[in-house]
Amino acid sequence: MTQDILVVGAGFAGAVIAQQMAEIGYSVLIIDRRPHLAGNAFDEVDGHGVLIHRYGPHIFHTNSYQVSHYLSSFTEWRPYEHRVLASVDGQLVPIPINLDTVNRLYGLALDEAGLVAFFESVREPRNPVLTSEDVIVNAVGRDLYEKFYKGYTRKQWGLDPSELFASVASRVPVRTNRDDRYFTDAFQSMPKHGYTALFQKMLKHPGIQVELGVDYREIPERNRARHVVYTGPLDEYFDNCYGKLPYRSLSFEHQHLPECREFQSVGTVNYPNEHDYTRITEFRHLTGESHCGSSIVREYPKAEGDPYYPIPRPENEILYKKYQALADSEKNVTFVGRLAQYRYYNMDQVVGAALSSVAGIRKCLNKSAS
Ligand code: FAD
Ligand code: UDP
């Protein structure tokens, strides 16, 4: 029997749509070529009993009541506000750059008004602000840009900040107060029993069949359901017909440190200028777990490998638009998610995009039925 809907990818985009459509009464087959649910948000207990995120640290934060309320049907939460330090000039200082960062780095004792004046004196005004370099030098000047952003960005993306849209570096704001939280969203919490448990609950529905380790490309066309929801890389769906749409990849180096209660004082430490890795995350901060040892992960950016990040820059946007035009003309297929929409989405934005797509999918199914 073929289902009403085939969902390709069991990450946030796919799981939300599968759950929503099953709830309405449609039969859904959700597949993933990986052997697990949850896409890049997948977490698991490592060989030492510690809950880790296989694909790097995933911190949930949102300003959308709709999104947090929706996910709350499938998990309890553990309040968690992420804090990050950057290793700069031999010190560990808060990032986003704030009052303490500047005072400690330059040996100053500025107050908030003093910091505003300081930024005003060192900033290099840019108009228009188009690139990631523009946005940072325009706010804090060259020295802080070079200390915190330039090296990190070149390492993370293999590109200079001047080659990336302003939206990339703008994800990490600059503050004049002492707020040292990485995010300021109204809702900041981690799923109490982890992301994978959340997905298991979301997909536990009589109308949903899950098949893991199955690649869409291996499913014959005649077996492909009345409607397909595709959440994988957009270029791959179209056999790279316009050339490869660039995605940035990472290697994750997981390590368990026996007899270590705390490796670092915060969830993540960024290394903008030293090492081949960009950051180290210690999971106990994120999960609240306490073991006699501690598990950490280092992230090494690379060009080839699993697609993790769309690369927001003008030529990629042009290529994406060509693929998007093909996607728009594809009948009975909906493209949703970070890879399929080629958007640097956080988890909450993917959930929001998936929820928004449900009405269109219903309309499409009703049309094909009549
Ligand atoms: P994915 O999670 O990538 O799921 C797509 C799935 O489709 C994959 O599992 C893939 O195997 C499957 N698939 C692809 N092609 C096929 C095919 N042909 N057949 C079958 N299956 C296929 N967001 C936050 O909000 N907070 C964070 O702290 C955060 N940290 C991050 C850290 C890292 C290192 C990375 C890479 C991302 C981070 N994100 C974070 C972003 C978050 O991972 C994404 O927003 C979210 O997971 C995207 O969900 P998705 O369903 O669109 O895609
Ligand atoms: N960034 C930086 N220095 C930092 C942190 C971030 O230059 O210490 C820039 C870099 O370009 C990075 C982007 O800001 O890719 C977004 O950072 P974020 O922490 O949001 O990245 P993600 O968690 O998505 O990998």
Image (cartoon, rainbow, N blue to C red):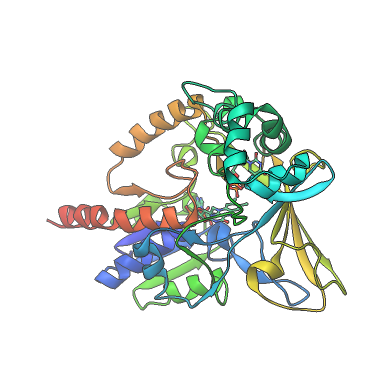
Which residue sits at x=71%, y=52%? Answer: 85
* Residue 307, visible in the rendered structure: no
> Along the line of sight, which residue is nearer the eye, 341 or 72?
72
Residue 42, image x, y percentages: 59, 64
Residue at the left extreme? 370
Counting the numbered discs, the total is 0
Which residue sits at x=76%, y=39%? Answer: 106
65 relative to 338, above or below: below
> Along the line of sight, which residue is nearer the eye, 182 or 190?
182
Which residue sits at x=67%, y=43%? Answer: 110
Residue 100, image x, y percentages: 69, 49
Residue at the right extreme? 259
User: In the picture, which quadrant includes the N terminus?
Assistant: bottom left
Residue 317, image x, y percentages: 45, 30
The quadrant holding residue 64 is: bottom left
User: In the picture, which quadrant includes the C terminus?
Assistant: bottom left
Residue 137, image x, y percentages: 60, 28
- Apparent side of residue 99 relative to residue 130 in the rendered image (left or right): right
* Residue 117, visible in the rendered structure: yes
220 relative to 31, above or below: above
Residue at the top extreme? 127
> Along the line of sight, which residue is nearer the eye, 88 or 168?
88
